[in-house]
Image (tube, helix red, strand yellow):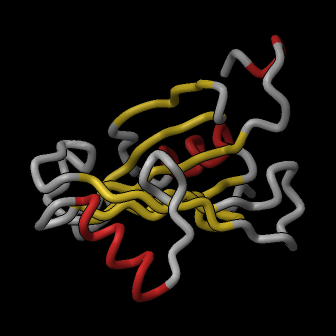
């Protein structure tokens, strides 16, 4: 059975300027921001090759990244086998709203939870080579 193995990212839609809010998190909570504006929080006990990183990033108030959800956030869950997860979800009558898609970061698919929140599912790339470029 496929399962969630951790949180791959937390994405928040801001009501103000994303750079200002990111600076507030950095100043007051010690969020270690990267040059691109978000943070990469590493989890050394995760057995994945990437050591279980979690991406943290802010999106502007006009962002449509969370659509069709009207929520101000989206959680990215790491999964160990996206194809199996999709099969399980479909068997349970859950619609895949987008995906699966693949890029150098891994395989992705999106669903909407019962509250209308967009949920991103991510199987991280083990190693980006020719055999991982297909679903």
Q: Who is closer to the viewer here, 117 or 2? A: 117
Name the image quarter holding residue 71: bottom left
Q: Quarter holding the C terminus? A: top right
**37, above or below 100, in the image:** below
Q: Is residue 54 left or right of residue 126?
A: left
- Percent x, y for residue 63? 18, 46
Q: Position of residue 41 (x, y in %)?
A: 64, 67
Relative to the observer, which residue lies in front, 72 or 81?
Answer: 72
Task: Name the one closer to the observer, 66 or 20.
Answer: 20
Q: Quadrant of the N terminus?
A: bottom right
Q: Residue furthest top?
A: 130
Residue occupying image coordinates x 52% and y 26%: 101
Percent of width and height locating residue 122: 59, 47
Q: Residue at x 71, y 65 (%)?
A: 5
Residue 21 spot, x, y in % from top left: 27, 70
Q: Vertically, is 8 above or below 15?
A: above
The residue sitting at 63% across, 56% down in the picture is 78
| Residue at 20% in and 64% down | 14
Residue 1 left/right relative to 101: right
Query: How many numbered badges does the structure rendering display?
Result: 0
Q: Is residue 118 rendered to the left or right of residue 10?
A: left
């Amino acid at each position: 059975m496929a399962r969630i193995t951790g949180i791959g990212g937390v994405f928040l839609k801001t009501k103000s300027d994303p750079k200002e809010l990111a600076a507030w998190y950095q100043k007051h909570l010690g969020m270690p921001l990267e040059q691109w504006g978000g943070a990469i929080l590493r989890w050394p006990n995760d057995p994945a090759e990437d050591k279980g990183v979690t991406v943290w990033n802010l999106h502007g108030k006009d962002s449509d990244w969370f659509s069709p959800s009207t929520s101000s956030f989206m959680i990215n869950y790491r999964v160990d086998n996206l194809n199996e997860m999709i099969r399980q979800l479909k068997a349970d009558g859950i619609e895949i709203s987008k995906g699966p898609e693949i890029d150098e970061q891994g395989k992705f698919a999106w669903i909407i939870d019962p509250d209308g929140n967009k949920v991103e599912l991510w199987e991280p790339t083990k190693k980006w080579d020719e055999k991982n470029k297909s679903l």
